[in-house]
Image (cartoon, rainbow, N blue to C red):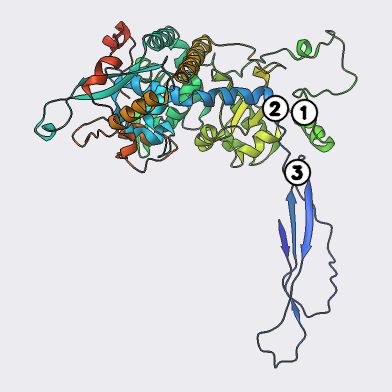
């Protein structure tokens, strides 16, 4: 807010004969006023005139709330970042019809895999020997490859990792009905058109526990609930049937009386606000949160955002309820803040969404770990930072983490064994690796169908093909037998897991 007065000669005294100014501001806003003036003269110095003042500007601003970090919740983001490459490469492999990819096609996935140019794709794959395995297949005979290598290196999941992927796929098949209810509730929150773009849903799909092929399978298997329509912005999922049984807010994960250790039916002497352990807020912020909680709840399913005054307490109550519902649908009761901003217009969320999340530490926690900020639903975690209700998918994810740790132990033992090798053998091994990395494959005639997949990511792809000589493939016949592995039934039959191309 700014009040501007017309310039007047100097010296000057201001006298405003008007009633006091009343500002209709939210009760949580703490204003800081500042007055600034500047003295200026005309450009012609020959004129003997008095200096003039620039317009008097009175500005007011609100100081942002301090973000207190919580290591108990931050560890979940750190844990996810450690297997981010594993999850993304596994998604790529399962999205292919035969669940494997040639390495020279994988070069197109640098942007999706979040690998900068100097880092080697092969070295990253070899960091996880219990998750991925390399093998060779014959090169298709074409006139353009007459002088090229006779085999090409590919990557696929190990039998143990493939078994975990099969279990996860079977689990998502069994809970397909509950996953469809999540999509239906999400569409019911998207007022007034009850429609969401598939290009936006794909960002939130992994956090909701949706399968990789949800756009082709799940969205079409329940025509009585929703349908796929074409819009001017792209294909979207539209609500077909409104379910009144689902139009209820999520019940509290933990009872407040039980969580506080209070005696039942005994009223509190003072108004209590449950905050995370070790979190203290200022008095004016604490008073605002108490008053905010005492306001009547706004059901996001029964209230349209256009019926509420913009930036009012009721609008913020509805926005907090919407974010709470979305986080409650996720598997780990958390997601990226950017994923929520994708649906800001459809879900009726404020423009300064992150500021609203930070302003309500009793409900949400914003973590700064990782490349992008994450938001947690506080009531979904206990005081030790563990989930109150653990989804079965997380059990499979923990087993995947154990496979990663086992691979790390294998690499550590292998490194210890290499210490006993003499320098001559080390030089020979290094020379063999350098010769193997000098093989180059031309993938200009190889169609991979991954262009649409990369456009869905936030990280834009600048280079489609990586022809860096430091990251070329191993195509030698001498190493083909070393990398060859047996194929599991999960990898042989692509229909077992029900994962088709995206």
The quarter holding residue 9 reads: bottom right
Please identify the quadrant where the C terminus is shown.
Answer: top left
Q: What element carries label 1?
A: loop
The quarter holding residue 349 reads: top right
- Residue under the point 80% across and 14% down: 260
Q: Residue furthest left?
A: 143
Please tell me how crowded label 1 is: few (under 14), some (14-19), or many (20+) other residues with Cα within 10 Å: few
Residue beneath disc 2: 70
The label nearer to you, 1 versus 3, is 1
Q: Distance between the residues labelled 1 and 3?
A: 20 Å
User: Is 6 drawn above or below residue 241 in the view shown?
Assistant: below
The quarter holding residue 165 reads: top left
Asked if labels 2 and 1 touch by Cβ distance under 8 angstroms, the answer is: yes
Q: Which residue lies furthest to the right in this view?
A: 269
- Residue 305 in sight: yes
- Residue 301 in sight: no
Please tell me how crowded label 3 is: few (under 14), some (14-19), or many (20+) other residues with Cα within 10 Å: some
Residue beneath disc 3: 29
Q: Nearer the viewer, residue 111 or 134?
A: 134
Of callouts 1 and 3, the N-terminal one: 3
- Residue under the point 24% across and 35% down: 440
User: Is 296 drawn above or below residue 483 in the view shown?
Assistant: below
Q: Nearer the viewer, residue 63 or 126?
A: 126
Residue beneath disc 1: 279
Q: Which of 309 and 495 is in front in this view?
A: 495
Question: Where does residue 304 sit, x and y in percent of width and height?
Answer: 57, 32
Q: Distance between the residues labelled 2 and 3?
A: 25 Å
Seen in the image, is 198 located left or right of residue 56? Answer: left
Of callouts 1 and 2, the N-terminal one: 2
Please tell me how crowded label 2 is: few (under 14), some (14-19), or many (20+) other residues with Cα within 10 Å: some
Question: Where does residue 365 sit, x and y in percent of width and height?
Answer: 66, 28
């Amino acid at each position: 807010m700014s009040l501007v007065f017309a310039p007047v000669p100097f010296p000057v005294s201001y006298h405003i004969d008007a009633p006091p100014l009343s500002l209709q501001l939210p009760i949580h806003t703490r204003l800081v006023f500042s007055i600034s003036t500047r003295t200026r003269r005309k450009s012609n110095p020959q004129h003997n005139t008095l200096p003039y003042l620039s317009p008097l500007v009175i500005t007011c601003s609100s100081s942002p709330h301090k973000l207190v970090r919580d290591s108990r919740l931050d560890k979940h983001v750190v844990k996810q970042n450690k297997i981010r490459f594993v999850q993304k490469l596994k998604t790529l492999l399962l999205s292919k019809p035969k669940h494997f990819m040639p390495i020279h096609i994988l070069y197109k996935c640098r942007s999706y895999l979040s690998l900068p140019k100097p880092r080697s794709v092969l070295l990253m794959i070899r960091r996880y020997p219990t998750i991925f395995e390399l093998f060779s297949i014959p090169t298709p005979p074409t006139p353009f490859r007459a002088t090229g290598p006779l085999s090409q290196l590919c990557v696929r999941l190990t039998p143990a990792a493939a078994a975990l992927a099969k279990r996860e796929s079977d689990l998502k098949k069994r809970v397909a009905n509950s996953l469809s209810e999540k999509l239906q509730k999400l569409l019911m929150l998207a007022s007034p058109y009850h429609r969401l773009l598939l290009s936006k849903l794909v960002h939130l799909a992994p956090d909701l526990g949706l399968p990789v092929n949800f756009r082709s399978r799940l969205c079409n298997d329940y025509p009585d609930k929703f349908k796929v329509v074409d819009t001017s912005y792209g294909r979207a999922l539209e609500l077909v049937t409104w379910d009144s049984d689902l139009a209820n807010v999520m019940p509290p994960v933990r009872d407040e009386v039980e969580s506080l250790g209070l005696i039942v039916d005994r009223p509190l002497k003072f108004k209590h606000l449950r905050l995370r352990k070790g979190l203290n807020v200022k008095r004016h912020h604490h008073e605002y949160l108490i008053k905010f909680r005492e306001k009547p709840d706004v059901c996001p399913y029964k209230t349209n955002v256009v019926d509420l005054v913009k930036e009012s307490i009721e609008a913020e109550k509805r926005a907090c309820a919407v974010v709470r519902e979305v986080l409650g649908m996720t598997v780990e009761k958390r997601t990226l803040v950017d994923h929520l901003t994708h649906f800001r217009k459809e879900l009726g969320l404020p423009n300064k969404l992150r500021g609203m999340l930070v302003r309500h530490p009793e409900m949400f926690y914003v973590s700064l770990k990782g490349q992008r900020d994450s938001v947690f639903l506080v009531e979904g975690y206990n005081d030790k930072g563990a989930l109150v209700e653990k989804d079965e998918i997380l059990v499979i994810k923990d087993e995947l983490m154990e496979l990663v740790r086992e691979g790390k132990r294998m690499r550590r033992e292998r490194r210890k064994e290499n210490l006993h090798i003499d320098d001559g053998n080390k030089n020979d091994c290094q020379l063999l690796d350098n010769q193997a990395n000098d093989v180059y494959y031309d993938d200009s005639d190889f169609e991979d169908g991954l262009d649409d997949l990369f456009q869905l990511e936030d990280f834009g792809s600048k280079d489609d093909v990586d022809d860096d000589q430091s990251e070329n493939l191993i195509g030698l016949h001498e190493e083909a037998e070393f990398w060859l592995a047996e194929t599991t039934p999960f990898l042989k039959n692509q229909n077992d897991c029900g994962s088709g191309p995206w």
